[in-house]
Image (tube, helix red, strand yellow):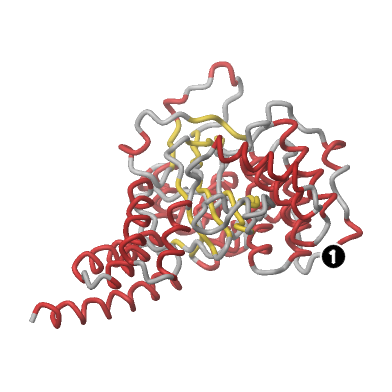
Amino acid sequence: MIDSRVALKSAAVDLATDPARAKMIDEKGNLELKRWLVLLLSAALGACAATPASRQEADRLFNDQAFVPPSVRINAADVFALSPEMKRYIETDVARLVHLRGRQHGLFDALYDRAQLKLEYDAGMTRNAAEAFAARAGNCLSLVIMTAAFAKEMDFTIRYQNVFTDETWSRDGDFYLSIGHVNLSLVRKRVEDAMTRNDGDSMTIDFLPPADLRGARTWAIDEPTIIAMYMNNRAVESLTSGRMDDAYWWAREAILQDPRFMSAYNTLGVVYQRHGNLAEAKRAFDFILEREPANTRAMSNLALVLHDQGNMAAALELTRKLERMEPNPPFGYFKRGLAAMQESDYKTAKEMFTKEVDRAAYYHEFHFWLALAYVGLGEMEPARKHMTIAVENSTTRKDHDLYAAKLGRIQAMVPVLRR
């Protein structure tokens, strides 16, 4: 199975409801909020609202005059466009493997056999099809898009699917990321009558092991949603890099590509909030909550905006509602662990990071910090174990190199401590 874990990013602002990092009510009864930002990397969360948004409704949320034009080209036609190099690859390597293995397996081998393209997983940015092919690297959404671009050129019918798996979280600075999952299926021949579709003639391409997908629920999503997810990724990447104007235009285009994709409205709202356009931010989050009343990310966003507008009573009411709905939010224990590390309370830090590992067994940063807590306690063997797990599960070269360097220092200390 190939890697189609999706780095789909949408942005929201998450309140620091964890008392170890922020008191929600101070001694005088006033509301205090700390800005913990959340990026939702999720194909499933907020994908389609119960009451779909129309293009006209979405247009009323835009304020183009507040932003300068983007510094990069933003065009949906670029997402699946094949470069001349990709077309030559189809005519040579792909054609040879198709002759040997058949069309479906030939395309799969041409793209994902390590003897062919030698693709590397790189979660650092989302690339379109041509960029991923040129770099021989990409995050999972990039690889799904690249696969689809080749498949479209070879006249396959493509089906994209959201896959419901256990929720996974990640972090980028003060942004928190919820990772969803999509895959795609290649149908050997174009089907004239959708009512008589033969799914037995399809091949699903997915990164997760078959055992992890057994019994998983899926729903079909269309290509405009995939394009919106790509645009939303680029918006978040621009936002976290400080390119606020680009972030606005990417989020705007994501909404135009699929007005049902609620995560893009979260991104737009956070761009407005960070840009100082609080009225526009509130409208974006209200828009989401009208369609998804239980969307806790939009509630968090709205509470922060209400606080910034000086409406403390409404912010406090919404914050308390959030605490009832989500008493142990993602990264809550992690934040407590970081606070404990700042106080050199390594025992409490170890307990908090262990709680996060218990609900996200393979997230690299939890293991990294748990290893550091063990170092603080002088327990080098478990420190080495968890730092090794961090190295093995890192998703960027930067993280890999950081963890590997720390692991080397820990390993150098272990023999000394044993003597």
**Residue 201 on image: x %, y %:** 44, 29
Q: Name above or below for residue 304 compared with residue 417.
A: above
Q: Is residue 318 left or right of residue 366?
A: right
Q: Is residue 120 visible?
A: no
Q: Residue at x 41, y 31 (%)?
A: 216
User: In the structure shown, which secondary structural element does the residue marked by tag 1 occupy?
Assistant: loop
Res. 411 image quadrant: bottom left
**Residue sitting nearer the eye, 284 or 181:** 284
- Residue pushed farthest left? 419
- Residue pushed farthest right? 65
Count of numbered marks = 1
According to the picture, the residue beneath numbered tag 1 turns out to be 69
**Mark 1 residue type:** Pro
Q: Residue at x 33, y 74 (%)?
A: 404
**Residue 57 on image: x %, y %:** 85, 36
**Residue 198 on image: x %, y %:** 48, 22
Where, quadrant-wise, is the N terminus in this rendering?
top left
Q: Name above or below for residue 303 compared with residue 393.
A: above
Q: Is residue 271 left or right of residue 193?
A: right
- Residue pushed farthest top? 195
Q: Residue at x 44, y 64 (%)?
A: 338
Q: Is residue 246 visible?
A: yes
Where, quadrant-wise, is the C terminus in this rendering?
bottom left
**Residue 260 on image: x %, y %:** 71, 35
Q: Residues within 10 Å of mark 1 (few under 14, many from 20)?
A: few
**Residue sitting nearer the eye, 135 or 43:** 43
